[in-house]
Amino acid sequence: MIRKKLIAGNWKMNKTSSDAVALVSEIVAAVGRATDVDVVVCPPFTSLESVFKVIDGSTVKLGAQNLHPEASGAYTGETSAAMLRALFASYVIVGHSERRTYFAESDTFINQKVLAALKAQLKPILCVGETLGERESGSTLKVVQTQLEGALEGVSKDLATSVVLAYEPVWAIGTGKVATTEQAQEVHAFIRGLLTKLFGAATSGKMRILYGGSMKPANAAELLAQKDIDGGLIGGASLESRSFVDLVKAAAAAK
Ligand code: PGA
């Protein structure tokens, strides 16, 4: 398998800095030397620095949950790609459905973030996915295509392999309702096809497509065994070391 599996924890707006240190210390103790799976933790901005001190020297990598596309300036409350790099972040989540919904982020704005991240050598974890209404009306693939093409506009073939995709059906996020393996694999294969059209087969074959939405140790093995599912973006189950570590182990076993 040319694509190394990736398990990323999206901690969302959870954990103070000391809680974050406690959690990541347990993760590092359990899987901090893993080389067969890429492990990424994405704490809130307030814990990036303290979490990095714990993972430094291990194989666990740091990700942020958001960035602003501008390099600097009058954007109160925002954080630039360079600021994240200075805290040793390697990844950044972009286009998460919670940001699309609660902060009205458009595909154009998300595209600017993807380009800004890549310019700063941050790997974007680009999230796409349909709502329940969109799935029920049969427009899942159309929605995913629009989001994906919009967000990847202007990304060169050379940089495309630094982009990680995450298919996250909105109706499965934090709801306990996981997509069936068939539902997930269908969309993952569709995404791979779109990436092939954009960047060619050699490049798309190297790009990782994560599944996200109520992924847990109990359902991970089946999802991770699918041909086009290259890992997971984990919300709820990443807030506790045991379930997160079990997910990393499931990804290692699925190789
Ligand atoms: P969940 O969240 O695992 O809690 O469903 C996934 C995500 O929002 O990235």
Image (cartoon, helix red, strand yellow):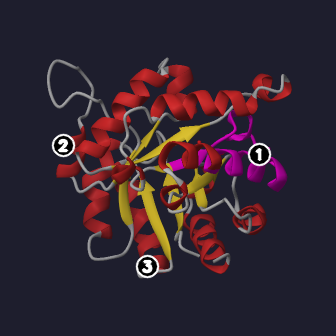
Does the segment drawn in magenta span residue 166? Answer: yes
Residue 29: mark: 3
Residue that label 1 marks: 176
Q: Quadrant of residue 76?
A: top left
> Can residue 23 be seen in the rendering of this structure?
no
Q: CA distance from mark 1 to mark 3?
A: 28 Å
Task: Determine the secondary structure under disc 3.
Answer: helix
Q: Which residues lie in the magenta part? A: 165-192
State if disc 3 and disc 2 touch (CB < 8 Å). no
Q: Amino acid at mark 2?
A: Ala
Write the residue at 21% across / 52% down.
87
Write the residue at 49% across / 42% down.
126
- State which mark lies toward you, 2 or 1: 2
Residue that label 2 marks: 82
State if disc 3 and disc 1 touch (CB < 8 Å). no
Spot occupied by residue 1 in the image (x, y as percentages of width and height): 59, 76
Q: Amino acid at mark 3?
A: Ala
Q: Earlier in the sequence, mark 2 or mark 1?
A: 2
Task: Tell me the crowding category of disc 1: few under 14, some 14 to 19, or many 20 or more residues within 10 angstroms, Cα based.
Answer: few
Does the segment drawn in magenta span residue 175? Answer: yes
Spot occupied by residue 90 in the image (x, y as percentages of width and height): 31, 56
In the displayed structure image, the side of residue 212 where residue 171 appears, left or right:
right
Task: Determine the secondary structure under disc 2.
Answer: helix
